[in-house]
Amino acid sequence: MKKGPLILLLTVSTFIFSCSGGIEKNKEKPSTIVGTWRLIDYSDIDTVSGKWTHPYSDHPQGYFTYTNSGIVNLNISAGDPLLISEDSAYKHYVTLGKLLDNAASYFGTYTVDYKDSTVIHHPRGGSIPWYIGTDQHRQFILRNDTLLIGDPTFKIGIRVLIREE
């Protein structure tokens, strides 16, 4: 196993379990997720092998923005994006799956339940057609300038973001 993913996994695990006694909900006065957050890790578990994967590379790029008025804008790109020139863009065959392996985005509104540490994205448009018009529930842990977003147990997927000024 590479040192990078192992160090990241240990860092994230330590962070999660230091937040109010593990996965238990934060009982302190809630902070706000309003602002722009830079993506520093995007990890999912491969349910067949049981190993963590990094679908957008070890160094993904992107931002999650939550406004005071309830707008969410999410953009993710692989650290090594597709290299296709403008003049060959309409000649180059790329499936939606291949495109989403390299970049994804959506925008819409959001609601937050700070008591249950849940944010619900309500996508109105974007590159993931099956998300549009649905409610995308995400568990989150917010501590200082770090935001973790994932599934309810953080055992299937986790996104690590840091606040941008």
Image (cartoon, rainbow, N blue to C red):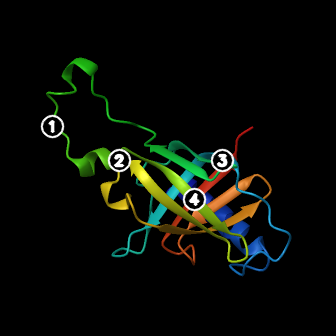
The answer to whether residue 1 of the structure is visible from this angle is no
Tag nearer the camera, 2 or 1:
2
Measure how far apart labels 3 and 4 are at the Cα level: 9 Å
Q: Secondary structure at mark 3?
A: loop
Q: Three-letter amino acid code at disc 3? A: Thr
Quick one: label 2 or label 3, which is nearer the N terminus? 3
In the displayed structure, would residue 140 be above or below residue 4? below
| Residue 73 in the figure: left or right of residue 31 | left
Tell me the crowding category of disc 1: few under 14, some 14 to 19, or many 20 or more residues within 10 angstroms, Cα based: few
Measure how far apart labels 4 and 1 are at the Cα level: 34 Å
Position of residue 37 measured from the top left corner of the image (x, y, whole percent): 65, 46
Measure how far apart labels 2 and 3 are at the Cα level: 21 Å
Residue 67 tag number: 3
- Reading the image, the residue beneath label 4 is 110
Q: Where is residue 77, by image quadrant?
A: top left
Task: Give the quadrant of the C terminus.
Answer: top right
- Reading the image, the residue beneath label 2 is 127
Quick one: label 4 or label 2, which is nearer the N terminus? 4
